[in-house]
């Protein structure tokens, strides 16, 4: 549970930072991601934290569900 909260907070914070520099227009979306990775200070790190954090969030969810099923704590 606490790992899920930590993952969620990190996803929100990195997502807000990325949203400040991202443009969703179809012609400039790739160049804005390229700008984040190359020109923004530690933008590459924030983007990788956000991408890998999403995967880790789902791993934590599945582990949390599996633990609940194993111990029968859903009753």
Image (spheres, helix red, strand yellow):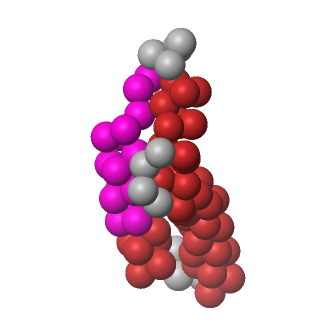
Please give the name of the residue rendered at 61% of the width and 66% of the height, measured from the top-left corner: 56
Q: Please indicate whether residue 28 sits to the left or right of residue 6 in the image.
A: right
Q: Is residue 58 magenta?
A: no
Instruction: Say if residue 67 shows up in the picture.
Output: yes
> 66 or 57, which is in the foreground?
57
Please give the name of the residue rendered at 57% of the width and 37% of the height, measured from the top-left corner: 34
Residue farthest to the front, as pictured: 39
Q: Position of residue 52 (x, y in %)?
A: 61, 60
Q: Please indicate whether residue 18 sits to the left or right of residue 75 in the image.
A: left
Please give the name of the residue rendered at 46% of the width and 68% of the height, measured from the top-left corner: 7
Placement of the N terminus among the 4 image quadrants:
bottom left
Q: Position of residue 16 (x, y in %)?
A: 32, 48
Residue farthest to the bottom, as pictured: 71
> 11 or 70, which is in the foreground?
11
Position of residue 33 relative to residue 6, above or below, is above
Position of residue 68 relative to residue 59, above or below, is below
Q: Position of residue 67 (x, y in %)?
A: 63, 81
Position of residue 28 relative to residue 30, above or below, is above
Span of residues in magenta? 8-24
Prevalent SS, magenta region: helix
Q: Please indicate whether residue 47 sits to the left or right of residue 71 in the image.
A: left
Please give the name of the residue rendered at 41% of the width and 74% of the height, measured from the top-left corner: 6
The image shows a total of numbered marks equal to 0
Instruction: Say if residue 54 shows up in the picture.
Output: no
Residue 55 placement: quadrant: bottom right
> 67 or 18, which is in the foreground?
18
Q: Position of residue 37 (x, y in %)?
A: 55, 47
Q: Is residue 9 magenta?
A: yes
């Amino acid at each position: 549970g606490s790992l899920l909260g930590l993952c969620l907070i990190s996803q929100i914070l990195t997502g807000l930072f990325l949203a400040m520099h991202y443009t969703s227009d179809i012609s400039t979306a790739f160049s804005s991601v390229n700008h984040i990775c190359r020109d923004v200070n530690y933008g590459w790190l924030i983007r990788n934290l956000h991408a890998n954090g999403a995967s880790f969030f789902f791993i934590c969810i599945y582990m949390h569900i599996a633990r609940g099923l194993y111990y029968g704590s859903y009753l």
